[in-house]
Image (cartoon, rainbow, N blue to C red):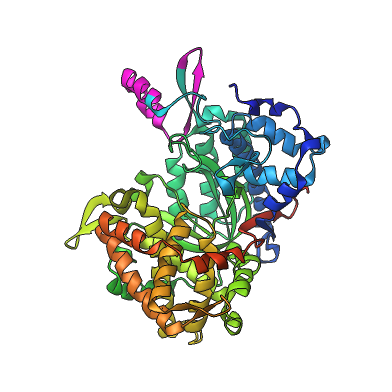
Amino acid sequence: MSSPIESWTAPPPLEKLDHERIAALLGQYAPVQLVIPVAQLAAGDRAALADLVEAGRWIDRIFWKQRSPAGSQLSELVLDHKRRLPTDLRRLLRLNFGPWNGFDRDRPFLGTEPRPSGGGLYPPDLTRAKLERYLREHPSERQAFVSRTSVIEEESGRLRAIPYSDAYRQELAQIRHSLIAASEKATDTGFRRFLRARAEGLASGELHGSEALWINDVQDSPIDVAIGPYEVYDDDRMGLKAAYESTVLVRHSARALDQLEQIAPEVERLMPGALTSAGGRRRIVMGVYDVVHVAGLTNMGGKAVAATLPNDEDIRTHVGARLLLFRNVIAAKFGPIVKQIAGRVLRADQLQFVREDAFLEHTLLHESAHALGTCFVWRQGVVTKTTINEALGERYSSIDECRADLVAMVYLDLLTRRGVFPSQMRSVAAITFVANLMRSLRFGVGDAYSEGAAITFSHLLKCGGVALEADGRLAVDVEATHRGLGQLAARVQAIATTGDYAAAGELCGELTTIPPEVHRLLKRLDGIPIDLEFVFEDQPD
Ligand SMILES: [Zn+2]
């Protein structure tokens, strides 16, 4: 490996550090302390949580290695407190698992070397074409090479696929040890069984059995963990290899999800395909949680407010999935981000209507819309085998983010009209939603959230839901907003359900151009954090 990143085995030239730039980049994150709500937990579960957090620390070490070829050295540098790395640099390296800004397409913030594409998962010069040629010559090795859970290495000119269970053997042995320790202390029988199966599964690479147990046996446990290689989006070389992550959770029992289920058929009648009824969809087990620790991919860049896991198509089809909603993370984004944004862009008398409960409910419903909507294209009311993702191609992500936002608003409004929420929620939901759209618009060109928000925002400007006042602030017309959102929701859901690629293009072309006045509004948001930095209770500096 010829990249100068390898020279990172030595400490970087600290005297050349641009502390101002580092401070500006750290300013993109609002620090939030994640607390373990110990009072509500049995002693056994509390002790098990400590073991799960320890497993997460080893997940971090694997992810450092996956993120770059010099990841091991980099993580040692960051974790070794005797090296006395400046605290600001240490924080920023940790937030990005390396010297590249995850909020800016991995541009380097230290030195000039871009992150090697594909990180530590491939040899540096292995292109897709070269891999395809190799696989044509060695067809029996295809499965091992394209596996989500193997690293590709080159040794004296010969390519080899190394299963994760071998590549990360040492770390996985530690993780196994911690999960088994947790299984001996946790209170819930199903969770204990899952932890034992997951410990063995992660170590051996046989993940299916433990994933099925996680979906079927764990949902009542007061504590939980999503741990393993799941998402492939950090593999910017080929989009094949899954990154390790871990999220340690405490179950939140305060909220009844049953009400959502009761109203789902009504949403489905208004927008076919939006929230397929329980009988018509694969099994999704929903739950609301507080996050107490995250590691690996889930602790990099923007923090997830929910997860639908696992991703494995086979498990999804035959067993189902779990939708985990992270209540404390959603709440943490409200004060330092959404409320601040509202303060700078909304008409002063509407600020009081920007409320955390509306942001929370909308986010929960947005995630439900992702998880519960149809994934397959319907033709004349018949479900085909084509996924909406395939049909809409590169337009899919923006359309789906836009769709989830809109379905959630229609859903929230129905819940209010059925008396689940007090009637004031109509105004609160509409005005909070507009502030939240401004938050998404900031993610920038090319981002799916931003493009989805641009479609909705432009529509609201056109239909009179939102108007710019003389001083450049936004005023929300609550009734016009709900009406406009309802119309756009039906249109976007129909595009998704029918997999109409051309109509998706028309919608994007028609509505993703944001007027210059709105761009000026976005400039007012400079200095407000984009996302969160988690600070754990017992984390050194
Ligand atoms: Zn979404």
131 in relation to 338, above or below: above
In the drawing, does residue 37 fall left or right of residue 251? right
Residue 109 seen anywhere in this rendered image of the structure: yes
92 in relation to 341, above or below: above
Q: Is residue 151 magenta?
A: yes
Q: Quadrant of ligand 1?
A: bottom left
Q: Is residue 127 magenta?
A: no
Asked which quadrant contains residue 94, the reply is top right
Question: From the image, which quarter does the N terminus lie in?
Answer: top right
In this rendered view, identify the residue nearer to me: 39 or 498.
Answer: 498
Residue at x-position 48% and y-position 78%: 467
Single out the residue that lies furthest toward the bottom: 423
208 in relation to 50, above or below: above
291 in relation to 64, above or below: below
Residue 246 seen anywhere in this rendered image of the structure: no
Residue at x-position 57% and y-position 82%: 350
Q: Which residues are magenta?
A: 130-158
Single out the residue that lies furthest toward the left: 380
In this rendered view, identify the residue nearer to me: 7 or 54.
Answer: 7
* Percent of width and height locating residue 67: 57, 36
* Count of marks overlaid on the render: 0
In the drawing, does residue 323 fall left or right of residue 101? left
* Percent of width and height locating residue 440: 51, 62
In the drawing, does residue 43 fall left or right of residue 245? right
Residue at x-position 40% and y-position 64%: 455
* Percent of width and height locating residue 491: 30, 68
In this rendered view, identify the residue nearer to me: 183 or 327.
Answer: 327
